[in-house]
Image (cartoon, coloured by chain):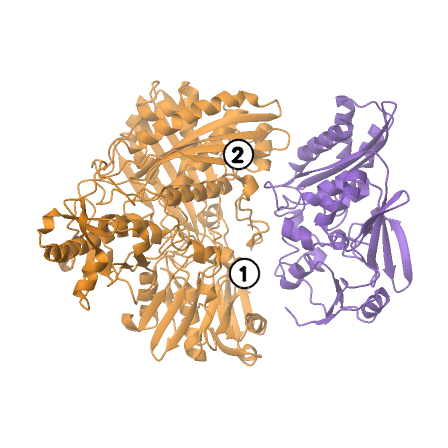
Amino acid sequence: MPAFKISTKEGKDGVELELIEEEGVTAWAATTPMSVVGKPHPRLEGREKVSGRARYASDVRLPGQLYARVLRSPYPHARIASIDTSKAEAAPGVHAVISVLNVPDMPWFKDGKLFDRTLRYIGDEVAAVAAESEEQAEDALHLIEVTYEPLPYVMTAEAALADGAPKVHPEGNIGGEVVEYERGDLDAGFRQAEVMVERTFTTQAALHNSLEAHGCTASWEGDHLTIWSSTQAVWVVRDQVAEKLELPQHHVRVIKQHMGGGFGAKQIPWKPDVIASLLSRNAGRPVQLILDRRAENLASGNRNPTRQTVRIGAKRDGTLTAIEAIITQEIGAYRTGGEASNVSGTYKSLYRCPNVHTKQTPVYINTGPAVAFRAPGYVEAAFALEQVMDELAHRLELDPVTLRERNYADHDQESGKPYSLPEGLQLAYDQVAPALAEMRQERNRGSETRRRGVGFAAHDWMGGHGDPPGYAQIELNADGTVNVITGTQDIGSGTRTGLAQVAAEELGLPMAAISLQLGDTAVGPYSPVSSGSATQATIGPAIRAAAADLKRQILDVAAALLETRAERLSIEDGQVLVDGKRPGEVSLAEVADKIKPHMLRAEGARGPNPEDLIIRTFGAQCAAIEVDTETGEITVQRVVTAHDCGRIVNPTLVDSQIIGGIVQGVGFALTEERITDDARGYVLNPNLENYHVPTVKDIPAIEHRHIGVPDSKANSTGVKGIGEPPLIPTGPAIANALHDALGVRIHEAPLTRERVLAALDGRNTTGEEPR
Amino acid sequence: MKPFAYASPHSLDDAVALLANDQDAKFLAGGTDLLTLLKGDLLAPSQLIDIKRLAELDDQITLAGDMVRIGALTSLSDLETHPLVAEHAPALAEAAAVAATPQLRNMATIGGNLLQRPRCWYFRDPEIPCWLKGGDSCPARTGENQHHAVFDLSPCVAVHPSDPASALLAHDATVEMRGAQGSRTVPLAELFAPPTDGRRIETTLQPGEIITALTLPAVAGRSTYLKAMDRKTWAFALVGVAARVKQDSGRISEARVVLSGVANVPWRATAAEQVLVGQKPSSEVLRAAADAALSGAEPLTKNGYKLPIAQALVRRALEATLG
């Protein structure tokens, strides 16, 4: 049983309780020998996935199941003057239609409703239909008669902030809080500076484009509701659906077994969960609502476009004296509550600097709402900050790594607390710097029209520390196998395998003896949302705590069986050994069989993160590219990367995250951009034809140089997250390589042919001298 | 999508008759463009006439005398790999190979490839009014026109999306068509025409007509097709260039330069060809030809970058064919 302590303190609303779980284990040391953790065990669900048997939300087939489609606003801003759904209701195969006419006023996001008479972006939900086939549902949408009154709209922050701009919401176009931060004396810092760089950068709306779209299958039995949802947060969906539908929480069960990508866009509950549930209740049949690609790309989140004006000052030796970043972010038409794009974060922390000012202004525009996208904010900021640092290095004729080393931040400057692994970033520099030198050797192989360049970028990331609490249970079966049960979900990264390895290690069992269950609120104990690269660092220690408790129980029983003391016993490969020796061992199966039908069970919890430390993840990356100066084509040839993610539980899984992150980074850098016609209010590429994610031919050789130093102060497993970080430095590393190749710099992402050719033509360049 | 009837006739006459009796019917072969038009609510045909089983239509590539004949149902994959194409029209093999994806190339037929509708994102969105769809004006002219035409030939500024079309034009292909009034054979160039007020489509195929085959001279000589895309593969051409040259005693005796992605139609750059013919190949001549290829171009607000790309590709394509 997880032990915990309760503390009380007077808060502004009376007594506040704090409950702190205790894990009851000491952290694995860097020197602790490991037999399962650290090994490239294949994914437990790999066979299921490659054979097509893995069941995703859209694979659910229930008797009588209906299929739903959503009618969406064709206008960026409009009012529904009238709506008539009667023809759709009478259409063949249709069993339920919902809209603002028959759904009570249900608040959604921080500033919207499930169905509203005001529509604020192309794709905003107008009505939904459930029918016996998807085609019938789609056809019925055309029979819904809506009279729209188009309203004036704003498609950019610039337009939204102009005097007299149309208002996205009655309160105005500032979407939430303007966040401002200051430390030291910025003006004094700039006065001390001997070199200054000031540039303005823009980053684009990038779309997550998970292979598996958002959606769910909802089914009622009496007043109990089950939802198979494509979500990163089964518990949050459960609680939200229960709240919206006024159901007790134990009447709602949310299941997510496999995930075809989330990348942050599925970290909040979206409307389809409730829409499908309402349709299902009205129709008296299960309802499946899976978004098509257009809806996915219009109405399921995006990385917020930013404009960042960055000013840095430094001494001639490279010491930073001042950093300022003035940021606007276009958050779309609603505050989803999961936008979480902390663009100012890295400006405060990545480099040692006493004088810092950041200001971040979120702005509403009439497009789909933004939501977290793999390292939200940090990807956008790194594109700017790391180009400015590169320019500074160039100006000072310093090696880019040297400049960064001279501004090394070994503690968190915002809180003053030390980092749990202060050398993390330096370890990444040490891995990547030699690769950068190698790449420079090959740079001269280019030609006049095929110029080569190499670029470097560093990053930190506010996540990866784990988000306690989180819980796990373990049971020993009568045959010596164990069931590990958690309520987390696999975002697609191989969560099951990494977690099972922790259990196997602690219990001294082979992987084959472990089953791991997750992704079902009816089965597992609470776990937090899979975001912030948190899952392994949150749930791993909870499982380890449970496994340690189970092991104690096993050894107690084995001690009685072997007529010895438990302190002399250990478990290796499923055998309980006395003083570590064979023979004389007893198997776990024998232990379990001896006590059956009694069962050994244990629970574990993830204790709090240390209060006196800040846990961050760090990394560095270098890229080699070739640029065709006549056609503007960029070819990324090679990327070498290193990341401090603490102990590496499974190198294959970590490599997969590295590859996936860099692939998305190449897309962000070169090709991915939602295109809007701002004058007319159109979104032109909510598809995969003109929204260009990278293909296999666009991907460079990717080399991950493992660090793998356990962060033993972070948690009992020494693990930190790796899901988000690899994407952060890819864009600026490529942009810096472009500057190295051409002597011109591009401040707008993505680096399209148009921009490359314009920069070469002397337009939109920084004023830096061409090489 | 509106329901439609499906017919699978066995003879060309039956197919043509079916179409003659139903103006709202459409032929179905590979379906790679047709299905996107149906799903995009841009077409709502009354019936689809499947032409894959017609006795007279084929997917064969054959040599007949000094002509290579390509059946209208030939897939892009076959064009990419067939030895006769590689030998007699390398530009066509290369153009097929850089079109779409292997899956699409396996399905798509050459006849349909020539007749596919533009990929303009205004045209393809059923919610957006546009001139080509019968509206008053073309929003791309003053909108997001980075993928659009640099030659202003029509109220519409969408570009023809085909890669093989330019290669076929560079090889002086002719197209055989069959309609209710019988057969006709015309130079392929005549199949394409910028849309006009009275004909808001990019081809001159008459209602009820069907492409049956393409033929091109089996002449020796080198040709190539180069393509610039927004990513390395699986994208329509920003610019494509098909080039074919013949040399005689060290001088260029015949030249074809045809561009994709720059106009409503595959754009034959006759000005460039004129610069080349009679000249000894040199970097100056090639540069002059590349400049001439874009003479008369009037880029829109956001597609001026296509000009240097096109010039570079013309030069490189010529270098490759002369090299």
Camera sees residue A46 = yes
Residue shown at 16%/64% (left/top)? A595
- Where is residue A763 shown, x and y percent of the image? 57, 30
- Front disc: 1 or 2: 2
Depth order, front residue of B316/A376:
B316
Q: Is residue B161 at all visible to an observer of this figure? A: no
Label 1 sits on a secondary structure element that is loop
Residue B1 screen position, x and y as percent: 63, 68
Q: Which chain, by letter, is orange? A: A
Disc 1 marks which residue? A75
* Cα separation between marks 1 and 2: 39 Å
Residue, x 74% and y 50% (percent of image)? B155
Q: Is residue B223 above or below residue A328?
A: above
- Please name the amino acid that badge 2 sits on: Val
Name the amino acid, label 1.
Answer: Tyr
Question: Which chain did the image draw in purple?
Answer: B
Q: Residue A637 placed where, x, y %?
A: 52, 32
As drawn, A193 above or below B154: above
Q: Position of residue A358 (x, y in %)?
A: 33, 38
N-term mark: 1 or 2: 1
Q: Residue A636's mark?
A: 2
Q: Chain of mark 2?
A: A
